[in-house]
Image: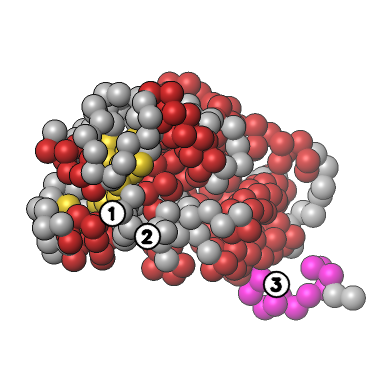
Amino acid sequence: MGCGCASGFVPKVATLAALGLFIGAGHSWMHPIYLRLANPKASPANLVSDSASSSSSSSPAKPHGSVAPQADAPLGLHVSLAQAKQLWDEGLPFIDARLAKDFALGHIAGAKDINPVNFNEPESLDAMKYMDLSKPVVIYCGGGDCHDSENTAILLQQFGFTSFHIFTDGFPAWKAAGYEVEVSSSSEGTR
Amino acid sequence: MTTPATRPAHSRSKLAFVLLALRLLLAALFAYAAVLKLDNPQAFANSVKAFEILPDHLAQLATFAVPWTEIVIAACLILGFWTRAAATLLAIVLAVFIYAIVSVLTRGLIVSCGCFGDAAKGICGDTLGWCNVVQNSVLLGLTLVVAIGGYGRTGLDCMVRRA
């Protein structure tokens, strides 16, 4: 089958690879603004240490239910129910990091459905496009030991967001407190 | 041992047909994947970054270099130009994909594939799993058939050979 000649085989492979690389590099050079990747520190460990350091440097730890932090302050990651409520009252964007099906069953009013699974979906990217990257966002999941908020925060960092609050107790606590929730259809839930 | 010259004619034409079909199938698959990536580079960049393998500047380069390499390979496979070289490069690319996916799985990361869009989700779900390793391994196997078998009876390679 075919000529079977192996002359110049490796150079041919290298040439094709170089061609793809060259065109890709050119395309990358022409459209660098599409990518918001410049956050090499994004990792769960760094998120926790950033949180700890900023908390200790800004003010002593406050008990749950204390006065909410200022939205623009260099705040630690985790906020209580009362703090989350105040941030919600102030109009900060909320991100629901649970799965879309849980979001559809009920979520904090106005929250956006962005989680590690659907993060790359056009709907999620569109939602993030209209958010101010320099302003804090509040992320929550199902409370308890769920890590979806932290994982989503890492992805948001990679996207270019710089400030987060993680509402640790999450949606169950919000709902139990009787604060405003929304229920959406499944199609809205996957937006 | 049966050589191409001594194979029966019907066997050779069957093999040529299989090679052509594989070339077109692989070309269509990877051209489609490339178009999806270039259509939404931010989404693919997020996927590349989430793998936590490449530093930022290389992740940005890979965001565009990977789909363009796929397009170059697809064009070569469709035209039958440098067929074996293109298939070999595709095999290398797939091997790198498999390595990256296994790396992600062993580190317990939750990453969406960013490879074939919704088409792949129907087969392997939203997030990367061992299904994707199997999927890429099957594609690697098909690619190796082309890399070893060559261009068959159609394509520029064949025309150049006959000229």
Q: Is mark 1 on a helix, strand or loop?
A: helix
Residue visible at 79% across and 68% down? B4
Could you tell me residue A180's position as x and y percent?
Answer: 9, 53
Above or below residue A159? Residue A1 is: below
Q: Is residue B67 above or below residue B119?
A: above
Vertical placement of B122 versus A166: above or below?
below
Residue type at tag 2: Gly
**Furthest residue in direction right, as rendered:** B1
Is-magenta flag for residue B103?
A: no
The picture places residue B57, in percent across and down from the top left corner, at 56, 27
Q: Where is residue B82 in the image (x, y as percent from the top left)?
A: 67, 45
Say which amino acid is labelled 3.
Arg
Q: Left or right? Give the position of A98 relative to B134.
A: left
Give the foreground label among 3 and 2.
2
Category of crowding for the residue at label 3, using alpha-carbon neighbours closer than 10 angstroms: few (below 14), some (14–19), many (at least 20): some
Name the disc covering residue A170, or none. Answer: 1
Secondary structure type for disc 3: helix
> Disc 1, disc 2: CB below 8 Å?
yes
Q: Residue B12 carries which label?
A: 3
Task: Give the number of the mark in front: 1 or 3.
Answer: 1
The quadrant in which residue B140 appears is bottom right
A143 vs A36, left or right, is left
Closer to the camera, A72 or A57?
A57
Q: How far apart are marks 1 and 2 (CA)?
A: 8 Å
Residue B106, quarter of picture = bottom right
| Residue that appears at 57% across and 67% down | B130
Q: Give the range drawn in magenta.
A: B3-16
Q: Tell me the residue that label 2 is attached to.
A: A144
Q: Are marks 3 and 2 in contact (CB under 8 Å)?
A: no
Q: Which of pointers 1 and 2 lies earlier in the amino acid sequence?
A: 2
Packing grade of label 2 (10 A; few <14, some 14-19, many >=20) is few
Which residue shows up at 25% across the image and 64% down it? A102
